[in-house]
Image: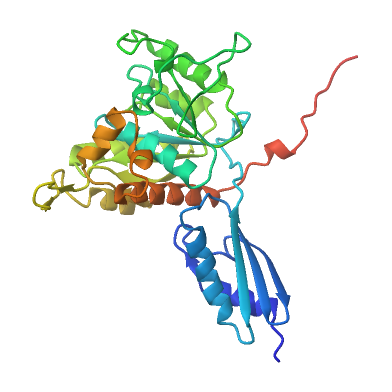
Amino acid sequence: MSVISKEAVEAAIKGYKEPHLGRDLVAAHAVKSIDIEGDAVRVAVELGFPAKGIQQAIADAVKDCVMGVSGVGSAQVDVSWEIKAHSVQKSLKPIDNVKNIIAVASGKGGVGKSTTAVNLALALAAEGARVGLLDADIYGPSQPRMLGIDGKPESKDGSTLEPMSSYDLQAMSIGFLIDEETPMIWRGPMVTQALEQLLKDTNWSDLDYLVIDLPPGTGDTQLTLAQKVPVSGALIVTTPQDIALLDARKGLKMFQKVEVPVLGIVENMSIHICSKCGHEEHIFGQGGGTAMSEQYGVDLLGSLPLDIQIREETDNGKPTVVAQPDSRITEIYREIARKTAAKLSLQAKDYAAKFPRIVIENN
């Protein structure tokens, strides 16, 4: 009987390119151990992103590779994940109890950014992560309605807020603190101060990801986020329409200038399918997201249809990912979530939390 070597098993695993990472699991440092006993092989894979929806598919693909090695009689593949904190802007430190902050932005309003943000957060949770959602749109907060949350957040100590909870998400919004119809007549400095307080004075609990739903544009709020909030990566939401793409490019360039990695682009309202006859039509044009991703070397993470159910479900406080967990649209959102988290997992990690804090006192 031929002796099976770890090198042969590892070489076989290299034959499988994990689509979300865009590389093989060995190159991605995801193969944690290879144990061989006789003709039985056991492989432990540990991903850096949540992958509940594809866990079995990855295990099966790796198993097929291992079974192709000469002499292997049986193979067992265990797939798990551990989400690490990733590096942020050089001058900033991560927020306590939040490993990674993902900003969801758009250059202009009306492209479905808030809908994308809430469904992305819910999709990350469905994939097995602990997720929070911060509504950073002070003038037009929409997440309380989208998440179906009523009431005001608690404050146990009089100075910090407990996040609200909905569908396994921790959430915070200025909309929880004011009446839904009350306009926020504030100047820029008050808005940016409110954003910082909502972020830092909320008692987030052990989050893998905090998704921030930014207001549209590239103004005060976005600049504050870039300069004062430790962001691990950003997502740009656009439509195929030329004017939306023009503004989306501005948002992308803003993040690049302030050294926040852009994880990818989501093209919303990419196609309309007639509910009566099934005819498909590109109402807002087509190929814009693809062209933009190629122009700037940024991944197109997914394209979403113009679908009345997406609008109806978020308006009714039950977004698509929880309203229709087995639908094709939910699968697109979950695929976008996996690609976003996988892209982030390949970035440099932040080790600040592992080092002790040194304090010098004069006694």
Across and down, in percent, residue 164 comes to 49, 23
Q: Is residue 256 visible?
A: no
- Residue placed furthest toward the bottom: 1
Q: Is residue 5 above or below residue 157?
A: below
Horizontally, residue 40 falls left or right of residue 24, namely right
Horizontal arrangement in the rendering, residue 107 relative to residue 34 (left or right): left
Residue at (63, 82) in percent of width and height: 72
Q: Position of residue 261 (x, y in %)?
A: 47, 42
Q: Position of residue 61 (x, y in %)?
A: 50, 70
One can see residue 155 in this view: yes
The one nearer the camera, 72 or 98, is 72
Q: Position of residue 181 (x, y in %)?
A: 30, 11
> Which image quarter: residue 110?
top left
Q: Residue at x 33, y 13 (%)?
A: 180
Asked if 130 appears above or below 18 in the picture, the reply is above
Left or right placement of residue 363 versus residue 146 in this view: right
Position of the C terminus by quadrant: top right
Q: Nearer the viewer, residue 326 or 83?
A: 326
The residue lying at 24 percent from left, 41 percent from top is 239
Which residue is depicted at the point 73% across and 39% down? 354
> The N terminus appears in which quarter of the rendering?
bottom right
In the image shown, does 288 or 325 lie closer to the viewer? 325
Q: Quadrant of residue 62?
A: bottom right
